[in-house]
Image: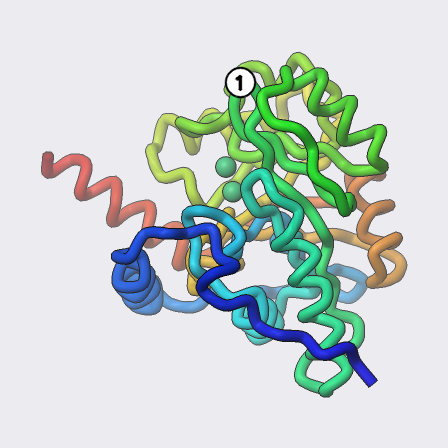
Amino acid sequence: MSENYQRPDRSARKCKYGWFDKWDRLINGALSLVGTPKIELAPGELAMDPHIHTLFSHCSITQPQDAIIRAVKIGLGAVCVMDHNSIKGALDAERCAQDLKARGIIPEDFLVIPGIEINSDRGHIGAMFLREDIPMELTPAEALQAIHDAGGIAVAVHPYHSTGIGDAVFDAPFDAVEVECGSVFGSALVSKNSALTSDPRLENCAKFGSSDAHYIRAIGACYTILTLDEPTLEGVRNAIIERKSRAVSTQPYLKMRKLLGGVRKLR
Ligand SMILES: [Zn+2]
Ligand SMILES: [Zn+2]
């Protein structure tokens, strides 16, 4: 028997904006027009979206349950829930996945990796494989120490983005770096992130693609292919440490980027 999972209600959710429901519908509607990500894998590979948000972030109203079912539907094998400055979303999503498995709604081997996205004094930093909060406003070096002390994996999320840590990506020992990110659209920023793929200063970092999805239809917009021995949390962790990863941008994201680039040119 599974424990009784209850979908978090409005009072549990961090997003207090009354207009956000309409905005969420509008963005999901636009995203459905650009299509659904197609995920293609070879044997021994797993597709992971290492950075998604739920209603435990102030800027999302996505139910963990809906996010997990969507991720399974498009062919992801793993997601990491990384809500802003709160581990609550990750812990809720873990319980939700257990319940969905017990009810036979999602496969037993689908992985929900607990994570958090924290505000450091330089910008956003992600952490995977941890089940506790990390304090805000630390320096990147201090944040990474706290993440590693807690047994987590430190991710430089969208380094070049208005909320990213920028060049501080080179100053701390990150385990992984997002080189393709579904929330980055400006062409200069896109190029700077993707140039990190071959930057020798980050040769010890796994390279990630992530959606940074705040809307359900954005899940999997960019994702990471891992080569691994077994599709378990331990297998994923080892693949990241051994840098057996590569970043993928899907057609819907590339279309969206083109559209938004066009809008910018019109202005
Ligand atoms: Zn962020
Ligand atoms: Zn994020």
Residue drawn where x is 63% and y is 65% of the image: 76
Q: Position of residue 262 (x, y in %)?
A: 19, 43
Q: Counting other residues with Cα less than 10 Å from the Cα at mark 1, is it few (<14), some (14-19), or many (20 or more)?
A: some
Whether residue 116 is visible here, answered yes or no, is yes
Residue holding disc 1 = 122
- The foreground one among 243 and 198 is 243
Residue drawn where x is 80% and y is 62% of the image: 44
Way the structure is coloured: rainbow
In-image side of 218 versus 74 (left or right)? left
Residue reaching furthest front?
11
- When the figure is inspected, residue 113 is found, relative to residue 243, above or below; the finding is below
In-image side of 243 versus 161 (left or right)? right
- When the figure is inspected, residue 185 is found, relative to residue 259, above or below; the finding is above
- Check disc 1 and give the amino acid type: Arg
Residue reaching furthest left?
267
Name the quadrant containing residue 126. top right
The quarter in which the N terminus is drawn is: bottom right
The quarter in which the C terminus is drawn is: top left
Q: Position of residue 151 (x, y in %)?
A: 85, 37
Q: Position of residue 102 (x, y in %)?
A: 77, 83
Disc 1 secondary structure class: loop
Residue drawn where x is 43% and y is 43% of the image: 183
In-image side of 184 versus 102 (left or right)? left
- The foreground one among 9 and 157 is 9
- When the figure is inspected, residue 15 is found, relative to residue 191, above or below; the finding is below
In-image side of 210 versus 115 (left or right)? left
Whether residue 47 is visible here, answered yes or no, is no
Residue drawn where x is 31% and y is 56% of the image: 20
